[in-house]
Every structure is written in structure tokens, then in C-alpha cells.
Amino acid sequence: MNSSTRATVRTTGVAVRAMLLFTVVLGIAYTLVITGLGQLALGAQANGSMLDDSRGEATGSSLLGQSFVDADGAPLPEFFQSRPSAAGDGYDAGASSGSNLGPENADLVAAIEERRAQISEFNGVPPEAVPADAVTASASGLDPHISPEYAALQVARVAAARGLEPDEVRTLVAAHTTGPLLGFLGQASVNVLELNLALDELGAATIDTTSTPGSKEQ
């Protein structure tokens, strides 16, 4: 075996050993360490921030929006409603997206006006009282939050549907309202799924975890 062949064999051997070493260290050991640390320190987040209903069954993630509608797609009056979604057929985690329509697009303007009229009638409020987040989808289509203004608009309807006092519902809304990050970044928001699960703790209605993903039925 000449020197050139020996050098090639040696170089190939070094490359193979280095590949095996880094595969074990970075591909296996590093993955196991990070996964273990994630489970120990941030178990809920590492597993999707899942939330359980009163029966102890997973009903959704606090990080992903979802709809609360009946089998025909009509909004359920006993639940707070999320903002619209342009992700797939709505709240599709596999097709996260916005509508990509500009503010002067005729289709978007028409959709906003239609949503405003529907929300106004559904909640018994004047159209001008409907906030922007109630009629526009988020950039991801999966925003789990609504504004405190949109939550406040829905209080009377939810309370009536559940036979509760409006002040009881307002108290729950306040308890599930999160202020801006660090007190000044972003805006105050209300997590819709967390709020609806808290409502279920009071009885009178329950989120059905057996319905198809993205919709909640009685």
C-alpha cells in the first residue's frame, strides 16, 4: 500500500470516527439532555401547554386558539368566542396563516362588515361597539387571546346563557386577563380557552372534548 492510499484510508477513518462521535454527542446525548431538562423545568410548555377540563381530559392548548361552535358551525352562546381565523378551515394548526388581504381589499372589507353585523346581533350590542379583534383574524390564525373589550362585550350573553350573574362572569374575565408584558410591551389580553374552562367549573355547560379538533360542541 503506497503512501497516498494509506493517507486516504487514514483520512477516511478519521472522518468516519468523527461522524460517529458527533452523532452520539450532538444527535443523541444533546437531544436527551435538552429533552430531560425541558421535562423537568418546563414540563407543561414542553408538552404543548395542554389544558384539562373538569373531567381531567385534555381539551386544547393554552397557546392555540380554537372555535366554540355547534355541529352546524354556529357559535355557542354559553361560551366566549375567539377571534376569526384564516388558518385552513379555521384554527388549523397545520395551516397557520393570515388572510394576506390588504385593508382596502373588497373581500376583506365585506367579511369585516358581515362579521360585525353577526357579532352585533349575537351579543345584542350596536355595531359600533364591536372591537377590531372581533372581526379580524390574527397573522397566525391561531391567536388564543381576545381583547378585554371583546370579552366585556360577551359577558351579558354568556351570563344569560348559563344562568349566572353578569358580575360573576366579569370576575372570571378579570381573573383571566393578562396585562402587557413587563407592563408596557403589547396589550392586555384574555385567554379564551382558559376562561371557558373556568366557566365550566361553575357548571351549566361543558366543553365537549370528543368533538372534532378546532370545534367545540355541546
Image (spheres, rainbow, N blue to C red):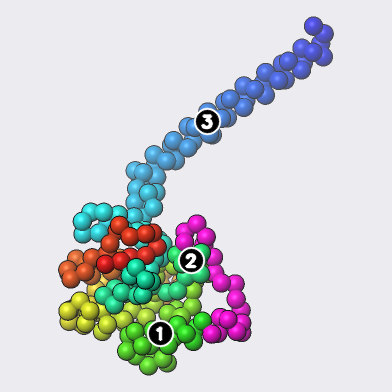
Q: Nearer the viewer, mark 3 or mark 1?
A: 1
The span picked out in magenta is 92-110
Q: Residue 89 shows which numbered tag?
A: 2
Taking the magenta stretch, the answer to whether it contains residue 95 is yes
- Marks 3 and 2 sit apart, C-alpha to C-alpha, by 42 Å
Position of 85 relative to 159 (above/below): above
Q: Which residue is mark 3?
A: 25
The image quarter containing residue 7 is top right
Position of 195 relative to 170 (above/below): above
Q: Residue at x 37, y 59 (%)?
A: 212
Using a 10 Å C-alpha cutoff, classify the residue at mark 3 as few (fewer than 14 neighbours), some (14 to 19) or many (20 or more).
few
Q: Is residue 156 left or right of residue 128?
A: left
Which numbered disc flags the more N-terminal residue, 3 or 1? 3
Residue 103: x and y, percent?
59, 82
Q: Amino acid at mark 1?
A: Gln
Using a 10 Å C-alpha cutoff, classify the residue at mark 1 as few (fewer than 14 neighbours), some (14 to 19) or many (20 or more).
some
In the structure shown, which secondary structural element does the residue marked by tag 2 occupy?
loop
Q: Which residue is mark 1?
A: 118
In the structure shown, which secondary structural element does the residue marked by tag 1 occupy?
helix
The image quarter containing residue 202 is bottom left
